[in-house]
Image: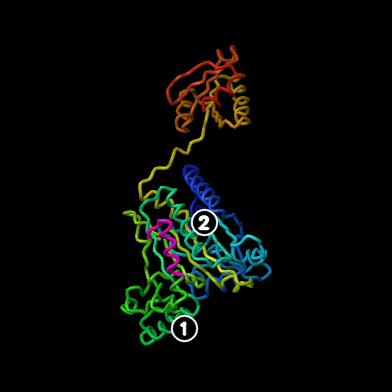
Amino acid sequence: MDIKVPRGTQDILPSETGKWQVVEELIRETCSLYQYKEIRTPIFEHTELFTRSVGDTTDIVQKEMYTFQDRGDRSLTLRPEGTASAVRAFVEHKMFGYPDQPVKLYYMGPMFRYERQQAGRYRQFVQFGIEAIGSADPAIDAEVISLAMAVYQKAGLKKLKLVINSLGDTESRITHKKALVDHFEPHIENFCSDCQNRLQKNPLRILDCKVDRNNSLMATAPSLADYLNEESAAYFEKVKEYLSILNIPFEVDPNLVRGLDYYNHTAFEIMSAAEGFGAITTLAGGGRYNGLVEELGGPDSPGIGFAMSIERLLLAVEAENNKWADLSNLDVYLIGMGETAKKKTVELTNVFRQNNITAEMDYLDRKIKTQMKSADRLKAKFVLVIGEDEIEKESAMLKNLSNGEQQLVPWNELVEKLKNSI
């Protein structure tokens, strides 16, 4: 039986994991600078969490979730996104009672959506996201966007575009919703079944439809910007002002609609403008979700966050032809010629590792020329050779592979010599 990786998933091989580790460390360092702390939530949750928070009219809930019944006949779902789980944990563990607000969280881990596989998009993908819960200050909106931009810039991306919009508060959205229904209802039979189902429940989602995006009614649909009340408009102006203070360029797109029901006020997407990146340019998206904490049983705690795909980030780095730094960390490759020498290389390999010197040796009893090629492929900084002569002198021949210099070093001086040289 020929068993292969499931469709929409991938194996990340050792030759690639170094890039992932660099990005993951970069993310953790950036979150530390901004004082966001890591939260780790279960990979599966009760299905109701996502139907209530993400929205039962969204593509995620209707078409993309991996849902199953467990042995207790409970409906569980592999998490399709991270915000719902983070907010559920915020409520369950009463983090709204913490003395320091807002509570600033980040997460990084696998998410699951049943969708068509495309470049950088998988059914199991790794998502990094942050949540700032407990503040309605537009300055925190700017900070959240700033952190996302910082991650991409530290990864070497320069061709970025930030697009923002305001979805308004509840009052603004109710007024706009009525205008949308009046606009689409007379011709709704010309739209897909999803749009027809969304007309009364959430007509804003019609504007995000991929099937009917070219329908002429889309271009003439009432703009939410025209229905923002004074408070919502003032909030959005503040967000734009803070972004300007942070020297973050942006474009306002009144048609930007995030695909999750819990968004309100600020919404944003970061896109790659790199040539050849692909038809789908979005790298990250997020926004404000005032009301979600209350929806999940908590007190009034406004929040904002974003999520980005690590796969998409790596793809964008490649699209800009950026080179990753040398990820090799092998300090010394040991070669022992003969049984006695091999025993000494086993001993020294262990000694080096105990002294935080990365070391590797041959375990296939290959010829010295083949072992030297292996050391070169592994990008070792030094090669250490022990033969009969070295055994007699209780020394080893240490060769610097960067300049070809070599010298005989007593065994008891090797650790200090390597540490000083490295």
In the rendered image, residue 41, in percent from the top left (x then y), is placed at 61, 59
Residue located at (40% from left, 83% from top)? 179
Quadrant of res 189: bottom left
Q: Which residue is mark 2?
A: 128
Residue located at (52% from left, 30% from top)? 331
Seen in the picture, residue 255 relative to 349 is either above or below; the reply is below
Q: Which residue is mark 1?
A: 200
- Which residue is more in the foreground, 6 or 140? 140
Seen in the picture, residue 247 relative to 204 is either above or below; the reply is above
- Which residue is more in the foreground, 180 or 239? 239
Magenta stretch: give its range.
235-249
Quadrant of res 301: bottom right
Residue located at (45% from left, 25% from top)? 401
- Which residue is more in the foreground, 249 or 4? 249
Q: Secondary structure at mark 1?
A: helix
In the rendered image, residue 159, in percent from the top left (x then y), is placed at 35, 53
Would residue 274 be counted in the magenta stretch? Answer: no
Say whether residue 353 is visible: yes
Dots 1 and 2: beta carbons under 8 Å? no
Name the dominant secondary structure of the magenta segment.
Answer: helix
Residue located at (66% from left, 62% from top)? 98
Left or right position of 413 against 255: right
Q: Secondary structure at mark 2?
A: strand
